[in-house]
Amino acid sequence: MDKHARQFAIKEIISSKTVASQGELRHELKKRGFTVTQATLSRDLKELGVARVSTGESMKYVLQPTAEAQILRPLVGAQVMAINANESMIVVKTLPGSASVVGEFLDTLGNADIIGTIAGDNTLLVIPQSQKKTHHVLEFLKVKLIEEQ
């Protein structure tokens, strides 16, 4: 299996579950058919911009927003007109033609509490992992799209 597929698997694992150590990550990769050395895994984590951060109770690996995402944040936020939610879904209203750009930006942030986004022309549907996560995702969106402008 090639490097690209392995790094995609690393991003998918880190985005979908809490991984506290390289040993845990190597175990998860092995379950997916990737056998890697510690040196290769360290190199992959560095190339992907993965950081190990404290959650208050433990440590976990997280994907860092790319430099491009940092540059785009104020521009993307300016496209957002409103954010509304019910118990299970969040709708982001944007300027005409901007919903897909905002959705792509959110996808690059790699929030594990977001299953995915679906974009129309000026409306973006953000689907949280569960109803329990809706409020958390709503607050995340407000910070990333509105408050950091």
Image (cartoon, grey):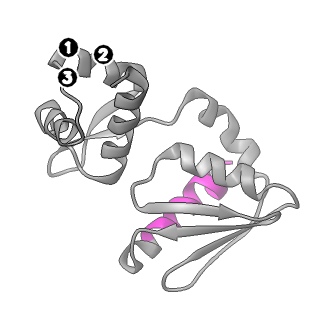
Q: Tag 1, which secondary structure?
A: helix
The residue that appears at 67% across and 32% down in the rendered structure is 71
Residue 42 vs 86, above or below: the answer is above
Q: Position of residue 113 (x, y in %)?
A: 40, 61
Mark 2, other Cα within 10 Å: few <14 / some 14–19 / many ≥20? few
Distance between the alpha carbons at the discs numbered 1 and 3: 8 Å
| Pointer 1 residue | 39
The residue that appears at 41% across and 80% down in the rendered structure is 131
Instruction: Tell me, for residue 36, which label it has, or none.
Output: 3
| Pointer 2 residue | 43
Q: Amino acid at mark 3?
A: Val
Residue 36 vs 95, above or below: the answer is above
**Is residue 140 located in the magenta-colored stretch of the structure?**
yes
The span picked out in magenta is 136-149
Q: Nearer the viewer, mark 3 or mark 2?
A: 3
State left or right for residue 110 relative to residue 17.
Answer: right
Distance between the alpha carbons at the discs numbered 2 and 1: 6 Å
Tell me, yes or no, whether the two marked residues, 2 and 1, touch with CB atoms within 8 Å: yes
Q: Position of residue 146 (x, y in %)?
A: 66, 57
Q: Nearer the viewer, residue 5 or 50?
A: 5
The residue that appears at 19% across and 22% down in the rendered structure is 36
Q: Position of residue 29 (x, y in %)?
A: 22, 36
Q: Amino acid at mark 1?
A: Ala
Residue 54 vs 57, above or below: the answer is above
